[in-house]
Amino acid sequence: MSITLDFNIKKLNRNTSKGLHLHYLPAKIDGDAHANVDTYFNNYTRSEHPFEGRVSTNALRGYPLLGEQIGVPDGFKAAVLQETRQSMRGLTARQLRLTGTFDKLMFWNYDRLPSNSDCYRQAMKMIKVSDALTVPVDDDEIKRQTEDHV
Amino acid sequence: MPTAEDIKLKSETSIKVETSAIKDEDESMADTKDEATDDTNRISSLKSLGPFIAAQENSKNTIYLSDVPAVCLEKPCMLGVDEAGRGPVLGPMVYGISYCPLESKQALVDLGCADSKQLTEEKRDIIFNDINTLDYAKECIGWAVEIISPNVISTSMNRRTKCSLNEVSMNSAMGLIERAIEAGVNIAEVYVDTVGPPEKYQERLKRKFPKFKITVAKKADSTYPIVSAASICAKVTRDHALKVWKFPEGLNIKDNGFGSGYPGDPVTKRFLTEHIDLVFGFPRLVRFSWATAENALADKAFNMEFDESESEKPKYAGTKLTKFFKGTTKTGEIKREECRFFKERHLGNVTEF
């Protein structure tokens, strides 16, 4: 089974200032439908939390949220892909289309200030680790390093 | 003369005016502003109450203090505290205080301040208007209210460390008394109406305000005219807050389309079932922390589960010896635990895209 990403690469590189506004919510929502984000949520985002100016406040179903904007890691592009023919899943070649891109997202915590212990920030550390593990090393460098140590 | 003791401050931002120099400046600014936008910055009659409330952000708390009558700065005063809208599943809860010199009790009686639940809505409106417009009332009675937004009620009650409605109430009452003290009211006696057990409440107020004679009683509303006055201010404010409620969600609900807000009211029930958003639940007029609201969502909206990871944290009991034999299944296959690095970072392998 193969997966085809069916879009023009230029679209991905296009200025993303008009990109999607993503919210990373600290809740599992058992549902998939259109959401009235602007009127029921964005309308209520405030950034005057007493602790720090960079922190925004809002609420989800009466649960208090504290959030901050986080950029997509350097060197990465963020895209939302959608599959049109979902019923064919797993049977034939799949085709995914680009529905939008974004360069930052709003990360929300349930009643806790955003910090380095948040799962999202923790997970993103993988990028640094994989970078370190995949940097190509050539013979000259190895020679130099061993000589330094001798 | 008490110049317009400035009026409107959002309780959440609670900006305190530090020096008298800044204060003077603020007041002169407020004075000029008052003239220009008199209708939404000041409550001077029943008519200006609605526009004032409508101009505030309804997802946050709002505090309003009336001008302090000159006599209240000098003569010892009594102060009454009461609330409105504690039980309803929607709309704000309003705390009200009113105060007047001990010797002016007759003025309250003349105004008709009695048990506010015995009074009709119309009568309450008239008394509220009288308090703000009649000279003999304006000269001795001052009042203040805090409109506690349903959004704030929900989020307080749903915090990780829950803040109960009683806690919210007490903080509001004490906050208002403090504001009256800051405004220079010479308080001698405080009367508080309570639904819960009076003893605990009384003790807390005593600790906070040791200089005042404090009386906390059930149904103080019908016993002490000053509490009735506070109750009327609170009730009238709550009623108007609902009347002028604008839905940031963009809903357009006709006058009284949500009923009294009491969970038993059929109009309220219908409102709750008809205005469910699958993802976000209700408009924030509704108190999500009420069982009625939660139940309505449990049936009709998407199920939603919040991260509450700390409650699930397993207690560390040391490595078990048998752990080393557990890895193999019957077929001899070896199951490996995921590396700690990945586990702690919530990372896992994905083969399905």
Image: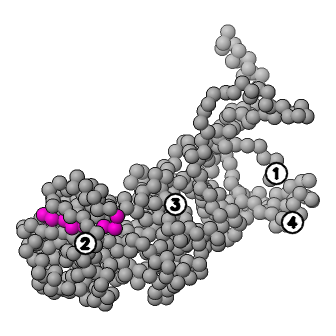
Disc 3: which chain?
A
Q: Quadrant of residue B53?
A: bottom left
Q: Is residue B124 left or right of residue A11?
A: left
Q: Residue at x 44, y 69 (%)?
A: B150
- Residue highlighted by disc 1: B352
- Residue highlighted by disc 2: B220
- The residues colored magenta run B187-196
Residue B135: percent from the left, percent from the top?
12, 85
Nearest to N terminus: mark 3 or mark 4: 3
Q: Quadrant of residue A86?
A: bottom right
- Residue highlighted by disc 3: A63
Amino acid type of disc 1?
Glu
Badge nearest the viewer, 3 or 2:
2
Residue A82 shows up from this direction: yes
Q: Are marks 1 and 3 on the same chain?
A: no
- Residue highlighted by disc 4: A87
Whether tag 3 and tag 4 are in contact, CB under 8 A, the answer is no
Q: Residue at x 54, y 80 (%)?
A: B269
Residue B288: percent from the left, percent from the top?
51, 67
Amino acid type of disc 2?
Ala
